[in-house]
Image (cartoon, rainbow, N blue to C red):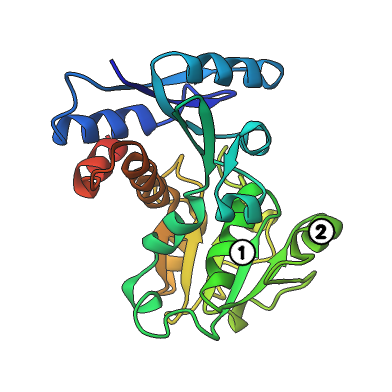
Amino acid sequence: MPRLAVLGYPVSHSRSPAMQNAALEALGLGDEWSYGAVEVAPEDFATKVHKMAAGDYVGVNVTIPHKAAALALADVVDEKADWIGAANTLSFAEGEITADNTDAEGLYNALPEHLQWGDGLMGRRALVLGAGGAARAAVCSLGGAEARVDVWNRTPSRAEALCANRRSLPVTAPVQGEYDLIVNTTAVGLRGEDPFAHLPLDPDRFDPRQVVVDMVYGERPSALLRAAAASGATTVDGLEILVQQGALSLQLWTDLEAPLDVMRAAAIG
């Protein structure tokens, strides 16, 4: 029986099993394939992955804090995952572990259509908040589409390190109204804290021409997205990005087009 899973620490909160099992069922694979959640500590990660690859697992998704480690243990690394410096998808075949990163394309696919069609993001100004793996994926996605990307982090040296040799510039005091697109890749707001006490944003300074993305989806919509929507901005939440990147992972493993509507409904619950 082909098996799939998401690996994280912790991972019990993940909506990927419900989403992916619903997709497998819709594709007619529900009686054969399964998708679970496996909690694994960082020190056990490499051993666990090699054991899964040698068994009946076809592949796994990888979430915090294992994305860099997933890239490091792969035998074959996709160019995008290598550029980002992290992998969120591992595939097992013929004794090899292949690392991919679907976060960047998942973010792009979650954006409103007017940012994807024609020139889309070309020349538009984007602000990425954060400097972790999700931020690197965002820079890859937006910079690859020729947006002008600035990166802010509470620790400026981390933003500077992220921007080195990448399509972006570090900023310490971004001017909110200058950006067409704002992407929060930090976990601020996940535990109910006020995002505006931690991020360089003002709840009253969004405007209708802007698109605001928040990776946080514990509360839907997040406080950040509620404020942006109140000003008329277009909003995208982390659950939609989860659906889009999960669909790309599923396509890698099954070579079938993922049923987005089914996955979205299951993720929302």
Toward the right, the furthest residue is 157
Q: Residue at x 26, y 28 (%)?
A: 21
- The residue that label 2 is drawn on is 161
Q: Position of residue 25 (x, y in %)?
A: 17, 29
Kindly indicate the quadrant of the structure image that contains residue 114.
Answer: bottom left
Q: Would residue 137 be found to the left or right of residue 152 on screen?
A: left
Q: Is residue 47 above or below residue 210?
A: above
Nearest the eye: 240 or 196? 240
Residue at horizontal 25 percent and vertical 36 percent from the top: 266
Mark 1, Cα crowd under 10 Å, few <14 / some 14-19 / many 20+, is many
Q: Residue 222: where, in percent of width, then height? A: 47, 51
- Dividing the picture into quarters, in which one does residue 42 lie? top right
Q: Secondary structure at mark 2?
A: helix
Crowding at mark 2 (Cα within 10 Å: few <14, some 14-19, many 20+): few
| Mark number, residue 43 | none
Q: Earlier in the sequence, mark 2 or mark 1?
A: 1
Location of residue 149 by image quarter: bottom right
Label 2 amino acid? Ala
Q: Nearer the viewer, residue 205 or 133?
A: 133
Please, what is the three-letter code of the amino acid marked with disc 1? Val
Indicate the quadrant containing the C terminus: top left, top right, bottom left or bottom right: top left
Q: Nearer the viewer, residue 21 or 70?
A: 70
Q: Where is the N terminus found, in terms of image quarters?
A: top left
Could you tell me if residue 185 is visible in this image?
Answer: no
Q: Secondary structure at mark 1?
A: helix
Against 132, residue 178 (above or below) is below
Contact (CB < 8 A) between labels 2 and 1? Answer: no
Identify the residue at image location x=53%, y=31%. Answer: 97
* Residue corresponding to mark 1: 139
Q: Position of residue 230 (x, y in %)?
A: 41, 68
Q: Position of residue 134 (x, y in %)?
A: 59, 50
